[in-house]
Amino acid sequence: MAGAGRMSPPPEQRLFQKARGTPIRARIREPRLLAAYEGLQRSAAIAEAAHDAGYVSPKIFATAFGRRFDTSPSQLRLR
């Protein structure tokens, strides 16, 4: 889409956020984290949930997960 209108990615991202109300990265991240949350509730390993959600690093996954759900993946598995 950026190439079609000859727009650089940052202005395109701002237009997306203005039109949708959330940044494009958040719109991509949300379903991935929700799927990981469900996987962890079904006793999936944290590394497996991270990988299935598209994260290369379990540490980066844990940080994003904690920011979104206000708990760590390991704490969720203990519930």
Image (spheres, helix red, strand yellow):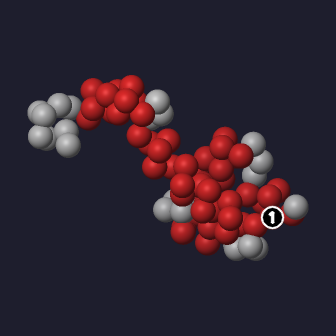
Please state if 41 lies on the left or on the right of 26 as rendered.
Answer: right
The amino acid pointed to by label 1 is Arg
Please state if 30 lies on the left or on the right of 40 as rendered.
Answer: left
Residue drawn 75% across the image and 52% down it: 72
Residue drawn 61% across the image and 72% down it: 48
Residue annotated with mark 1: 77
Residue drawn 32% across the image and 28% down it: 15
In this figure, what is the number of numbered marks?
1
**Observer-nearest residue: 28 or 18?**
18
Residue 4, given in percent of the width and then of the height, sits at 12, 40
Residue 67, given in percent of the width and then of the height, sits at 66, 41
Question: In this view of the protein, can residue 47 be seen by the observer?
Answer: no
Tag 1 secondary structure: helix
**Observer-nearest residue: 21 or 61?**
21
Residue at the front extreme of this rendering: 19
Residue drawn 46% across the image and 30% down it: 21
